[in-house]
Image (spheres, rainbow, N blue to C red):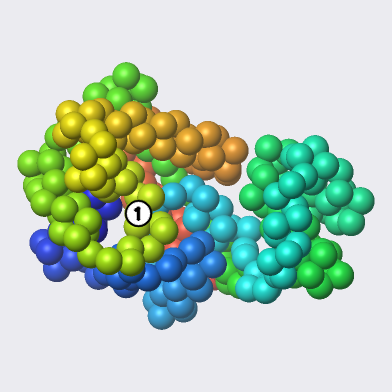
Amino acid sequence: MDIGSAKPNRLEKSQVLHEMVDIVDPQQYFNVAKFVTLAESAYDRHSGKILGVGGTPFYINALQDGLTQIDVQPQFENYLKTLSIKELSDFLYKNDPERAAAISVNDRFRLERALAIVLSTGKKPSSFLKSTLEKRAKLNLYALRCDRALMHQRLKQRLEGMFEAGLLEEAHALYKLNHLSKTAKAAVGYKELFQYFDGNWSLDTAKEKILIATRRLFKHQMTWLNKMNVNWIDVHPEEVELALPSLDIAMQQHFEALATDDV
């Protein structure tokens, strides 16, 4: 899934050591808990001198908040899905006010997860929720942003570039594989082309659906980032290099503080 996931190319990988690239087959199940474990291992290997680039805000947030590897019982998960968000929130506030206060009232996933822990273990989720990264260093987050209209224009150009690079052929090769994981099947750019290969959509329709899904994903990511402690740097798409001095200073300060355990 090289093209659709915008992996670094061979030249980029030859110039800078990359971690966590080509680590999961499309048939393998993968989730945020596994991501956190692998990220923390990479962090350890490099003594914290590592940069996270790109990625999904949900996964980044997991690095900050920490995740637990607690097994929960399926019957409780099924039961919680029958409750409304308000019922979930009220339920959690009664059992763990500290964890409830830290979760958005609209974040059904985390509400259900927290309550599944309560019901499965009889303990408060807040008592488990500890990040190993927090013991070593906090994350300093920097994000680039530009005019929304320009960003939408760049998203369209990006999609066109992916098709020129062979996204259609890459997706078709995946389509012929058996037993793709749920996450692979749901990946933006692939799931739409699978509909085309199934004969449900024309190629033009699939491309338009990919663009719509990409814009929706962009909006969702911005919503996440706006809730997080992010240092924003305004840029123009054609002059991104102007942001490098600011990023360079920020990284120097971070790693200097890391060396003295001030972060």
Q: Is residue 102 visible?
A: no
Report the side of 57 relative to 263 (left or right).
left
Q: Is residue 212 visible?
A: yes
Rendered residue at 41%/58% (across/down): 182
Report the side of 190 relative to 203 (left or right).
right
Residue at the bottom extreme?
Answer: 45
Rendered residue at 58%/43% (across/down): 229
Q: Nearer the viewer, residue 204 or 153?
A: 204
Above or below, 41 relative to 4: below
Q: Nearer the viewer, residue 3 or 8?
A: 3
Question: Which image quarter is the C terminus in?
Answer: bottom right
Q: Amino acid at mark 1?
A: Lys
Rendered residue at 27%/42% (across/down): 195
Q: Position of residue 253 (x, y in %)?
A: 45, 56
Q: Which residue is mark 1?
A: 185
Above or below, 114 relative to 187: below
How many neighbours does mark 1 have within 10 angstroms: few (below 14), some (14-19), or many (20 or more)?
Answer: some
In the picture, residue 131 is in which quadrant?
bottom right
Rendered residue at 62%/65% (across/down): 67
